[in-house]
Amino acid sequence: MILTSYVQERLGVPREYRQTVTPPPSFGAPTVGGIPAQFAPYFERAVRYELHRWRQNAIALFKGKTREQFVSDILPLDLQNEIRSQLNRCATADDAAAVFDRLLSEEELEKRLNRPYAPVLPDPLDALKRASEKELEQAIKDYFAGLRERIIANAAE
């Protein structure tokens, strides 16, 4: 806004024709989790869904059914870090499920959603990192899958 005023002043634009910047319509409106209040039910629903997905992923990790780490663009980073620190202290899949059960209780979730959080700033290279990691993992699997046969074939010669 200051730069626009400066440019208009330098160009000699009369005050009555100068462009003014108006705030967005929701400026000053109450917010929930950094979003306008009218979207709060949708945000809460999305957070619940993400927490359920993460709960299933955490249980699968503890049971050894997956090696995928959970990634979310919806959950605030502060909340993600808090959950990860709690999961690091878990010893069993039931402990991990209990972390999410506590978070998904009605009053706990409402308390956390009304708390100001740092915005979610996804790493722009995150998708590339994940794709590269999967590709490298597949290449390593392919290499080691045939290694036994190659060793046996070379030893037989």
Image (spheres, rainbow, N blue to C red):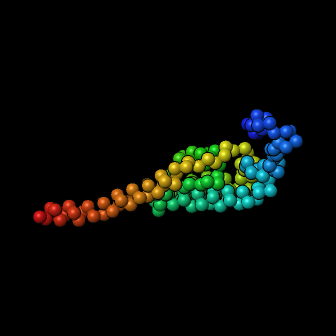
Residue 111 visible at all: no
Give the quadrant of residue 41: bottom right
Image location (x, y in percent) of residue 32: 76, 50
The structure residue drawn at horizontal position 74% and vertical position 51%, both measured from the top left corner, is: 35
Q: Percent position (x, y) of residue 97?
A: 59, 57
Give the quarter of the figure containing the N terminus.
top right
x then y, percent, for residue 77: 62, 46
Residue nearest the observer in this picture, 154 or 56: 154
Nearer the observer, 58 or 73: 73
Q: Is residue 12 left or right of residue 100?
A: right
| Residue lying at 59% horizontally and 49% vertically, measured from the top left | 122
**Viewport quadrant of the C terminus:** bottom left
Which residue is found at the position 19% from the left and 64% from the top?
152
Residue 45, picture quadrant: bottom right
Q: Residue at x 81, y 39 (%)?
A: 13
Task: Find residue 95 and report its horizontal and vertical position in percent.
Answer: 57, 53
